[in-house]
Image: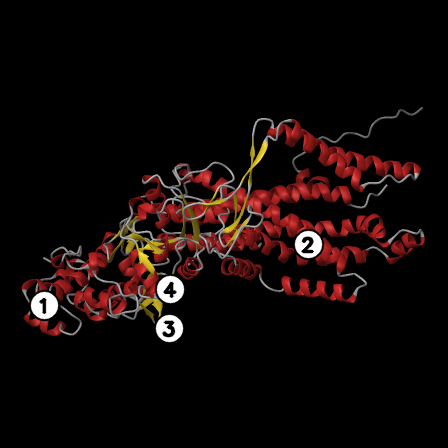
Amino acid sequence: MSTLSDPPRESFKPSMLLNDTRYRGYTFQFIAIVLVAALFAYLGLNLQRNLAAAGLTISFDFLGEPANYDINQTLIEYNNQMDHWRASLVGVLNTLLVSFLACITATIIGVVAGVLRLSNNWLVRKLMSAYVEAFRNVPVLIWIIIIFTIMTAVLPAPRAFRGEDATASMIFGSVAFTNRGVYIPKPIFGPGGWTVMLVFLAGVIGAFAYRRYATKLLYATGKLLPMGWPALLIAFVPAILAYYLLGQPISLEYPELGGFNFTGGINILGSLIALWFALAIYTGAFIAENVRAGILSVSKGQTEAAASLGLRPRRIMNLVVLPQALRVIVPPLISHYLNITKNSSLAIAVGYMDLTGTLGGITLNQTGRAIECILLLMAFYLAISLSISAIMNVYNNAVSLKER
Amino acid sequence: MKKTVFLGALTVAGLAAGAASAQTLNDVQDRGTLNCGVTTGLVGFAAPDANGEWDGFDVAVCRAVAAAVLQDPTAVEFVPTTGKTRFTALSSGEIDMLARNTTWTFTRDNDLNFEFVGINYYDGQGFMVPKALGVSSATELAGATVCIQTGTTTELNLADYFRRNNMEYTPVPIETNAEAQQQYLAGACDVYTTDASGLAATRAAFENPGDHVVLPEIISKEPLGPLVRHGDNEWGDIVRWTLNALIAAEEYGITSTNLDEMAQNGGPEVKRILGTEGNLGEMIGLDAEWARRAIGAGGNYGELFARHIGESTPIGLSRGLNAQWTDGGLLYAPPFR
């Protein structure tokens, strides 16, 4: 008769940290970490001590002092009596705004150009390759300056709109293109105005729900419902009805010529437009190449198979090729988005007050705290970039190849 | 690995900076050159000429100090600094003195630990507008779009001025004077504001200077002067008194051409400045002829002004506040005794 017993449990002895292969790896990794940490601590301390000896004590107290300067585009309330921290936040929001606009526009331009580069039409194909080669091979700073200079030189100054013999006039009496930017009407929300907006939002969601339902029905039963006009109806009709039922609560404030400038309305700064378009067309050229690579990565057999099923070319692209191409397109797209965000720091070339212009520009100059400002600047850009990557990685996981 | 190398380099740089903060005079004399921070290029004040030699009103101060300390006005290493890098360059010891149109302010003097040794140019911020606007005073500028060169004290003065007068404005920040000029001429802004000296220089470069007016209001005080690190008072004294020697030289009529004659036949104070009487040089750790060399390097204050930014130059500035106190200006060198 034999008794079964567990193998004898060895008690842990310190010597095993070196002699036992199971633990030895951990020991050395731990030692390495401690050494690296000690090295960095030594360097950091040394740096700090020497900076202090040179009269460069690191202090972030200046962030709480009044900024004393004005910013021409503020998405949150700001005046020159608020502190440097607030001014930095205004800069962050301006950076985010231009990056967001440029990312969307660059994606649209890139996808269209990328698809058209593979067109069967010789002229279209060559035009698109000319676009890609011209725009991605010239530094983006030059594009920013070119667009800004053209805007300033070609568009009329506000004073050209003045007087009897005005040489410029507003489009539809409501939009003015000037060399200081574009002035557009501003919506004024009366009582009930927000209800109309909510109804409109609900309509848009409804339209998407309808499209989803129609697609589902198509896959389940093969019955094809019309998609275009019913979706438009669902999106707009309730909102228009609500607008009139509530007594037209949203009105427009038109820009008018005041003393020196147009007053009223919304002024989209020339520097924002220049930066936005330069970043969009420059990065769009890179994205076009990614899109082309993505499409070419889908084997020709897929297209031919789809064609043999009787799908039309546009459907083949939308239903068969692009969904498979996305898993190739999205990862480099993330880094292009990051590039747009970082390239937006060239804003100072045209006087757009982004983060580099406020915190890294005027604040740095006025307080003389260069090291602190640059550290903060790095932290801000790092945080923004990491957030963009995190969001885009979620999307990437959604479109990547599902292995079951 | 790379990161470690980088941090190591940073540490070495830090150590070097720590060592450099004391005894600047010895360092400069051991090195044989003076490291002087100047602008990256502003014609009249500091810019390389056609031969690549730095020249200008601020540059002349550097050369005078080098002449006093190193017996050689050309023994200067000019370090171009931007508005952003100038203070870090000075406090890290990369440069020994900064002569870069820097406005003397309380925070720069105290919070940033610098020592302004004097004022070599009294400036003030003004406005320029096209004549066609029909504006005759800065108080009529409510609602205007204003071009400003960013990274200067002008932004703060502008904000203060409009706040004080309860006026709104739209700032258009611009990086360089050249760009600002272009924007202003294209009508992208109604007003251009910067130091009055800069406005004069800019207006002079226009095709039709007569179409533009500089408004009478001067909205700020901009005393520009050289500065050194706080804490090395001997070095600060040398730079301060070199500047004073240039100013006093003009007051007493010492020029670069009559140095020898004045040293022999001048009044007692002139003789003390030029080292033929007394031992002033010894007191600041230099030899007796330090001031003589400083003045000989480019001339006295008036000669420097006339040659670099005066009325006969394209910059065309009049002396104004920068005249000697005897001529109704603000230049007033303390006595040499």
Front label number (3 vs 2): 2
| Disc with the residue nearer the chain's start (1 vs 4) | 4
Q: Mark 4: which secondary structure?
A: loop
Q: Amino acid at mark 2?
A: Ile
Please report, as a chain letter, where disc 3 is located.
B
Q: CA distance from mark 1 to mark 4?
A: 38 Å
| A237 lies above or below A47 | above
Q: Which residue is mark 1?
A: B276
Determine the residue positioned at 61% across, 29% down: A194
Q: CA distance from mark 2 to mark 1?
A: 78 Å
Residue B52 is tagged as 3
| Disc with the residue nearer the chain's start (4 vs 3) | 4
Front label number (4 vs 3): 4
Residue B41 is tagged as 4
* Residue A38 visible in the shown view: no
Q: CA distance from mark 2 to mark 4?
A: 41 Å
Determine the residue positioned at 82% across, 40% down: A227
Residue A326 position in % (x across, y down): 77, 49
Q: Are marks 1 and 4 in contact (CB under 8 Å)?
A: no
Q: CA distance from mark 1 to mark 3?
A: 36 Å
| A9 lies above or below B213 | above
Left or right of A353 in this view: A308: right
Q: Are marks 4 and 3 in contact (CB under 8 Å)?
A: no
User: Which quarter of the image is occupied by the N terminus of chain B?
Assistant: bottom right
| B53 lies above or below A314 | below
Residue A109 is tagged as 2
